[in-house]
Amino acid sequence: MPCLSVLNLAFTKIESLPNSISELKNLTTLLLRGCEEIRDLPCLSMLQELKKLDLSRTQIEEVPEGMDMLIKLRYLDLSVRTLKEIPAGLLPKLVHLQHLGFHESNEKTSLKAEEMEPLKKLECFTGRFEDIGELNKFISSMQQSKKNLIKYYLQVGSSLMGSTTDKVVTIGGVQNWEGELIMHPIEIQELIILRCDYLRNLVDDNSSFKNAIDLRICSIWGCKGIECVVPLSSFASSSAHPFQSLEVLNLQWLPKLSALIMNDEGIGSATTSTLVPSATFSHLKKIFVQGCSSMKTLLPHWLLPNLQNLEDIWVEKCDEIVEILGAATSEVEEKGSDALIQFHLPKLRKLSFR
């Protein structure tokens, strides 16, 4: 079968490939996805016409010998939990790669930015970086080359959460980033932060997330130090409108969180509304809050005019919460604490409080 160009063995029980596969010199596509019995592969150096190689969900522990010779590769998927390392110098040789994937939960295949820098044609990428510094270097190199990925999942540290959009950054369990700017692609759509206890808020003068104007989904879980999502001072120091495109806000198990937006002197007051741009949270559709034991008012009255697209509010195990929708102090004084106060949220369909 010397003329064979596509070999698709995906999701079969095959345990190995014969050495004679090297005779398939016209092979352009080799698909072994989901072949969970495969633990090693023969040398692939002779398959120099290969453009697509999918080894995801196999059980290989080492990158096949000769892969550095496959310089025509456009698509490489090494999403393998058992892979022990990525040989230094391999990726820079595969300069035609457009799709590259590694298993984000495999710490042993964490990447260095310098290995990725030569991949100028990359369009789709899933991978994990060693630390915030390496993530920043990778994003910086993308910006310098004016290269925007069509689809990506970039991770630092660990994560147990799945994603739902095409452009995702996940930071999990990182405790040494204090004072270090976290860069992100300008067009980021989803941000996931878990168990990062140094974090005090998401947007401040030292954060590039204040310019994440395309962010659609934001999830913050288990960060013991976070006090607010956005400090009021960030609006004065930035021409961008943080969270102007945000549709889903997920805040869970944040024991010090007391407000979405906080004044430098504490929780936002009546004067705060004049400082918060009308675009902030203006596309928010869903807000989920769980286990935030310091929060007393979820949505203060001065923020409600921004929330005309809000459809779903879900609050659970927030023992100190007094108000989900806050009323102005002047209105309470005028009508009394037991009076019926109206709120105008025209698209609100569901309110759950447990």
Image: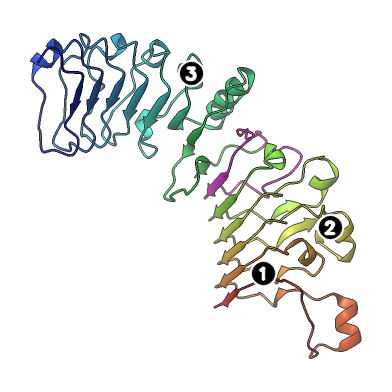
Magenta stretch: includes residue 196? yes
Note whether 215 is above or below 262 in the view shown. Answer: above
| N-term-proximal mark, 2 vs 3 | 3
| N-term-proximal mark, 3 vs 1 | 3
Q: Nearer the viewer, mark 2 or mark 1?
A: 1
Q: Nearer the viewer, residue 211 or 234?
A: 211
Q: Secondary structure at mark 3?
A: loop
Q: Which residue is mark 3?
A: 121
Q: Secondary structure at mark 2?
A: loop
Q: Which residues are magenta?
A: 179-207
| Mark seen at residue 294 | none
Residue drawn 55% across and 42% down?
A: 175
Q: Which residue is mark 1?
A: 347
Name the amino acid type tagged 1: Lys
Task: Bin the neighbour count of mark 2 within 10 Å (Cα to Cα): few under 14, some 14-19, many 20 and up.
Answer: few
The x, y position of residue 198, in whole percent, is 61, 46
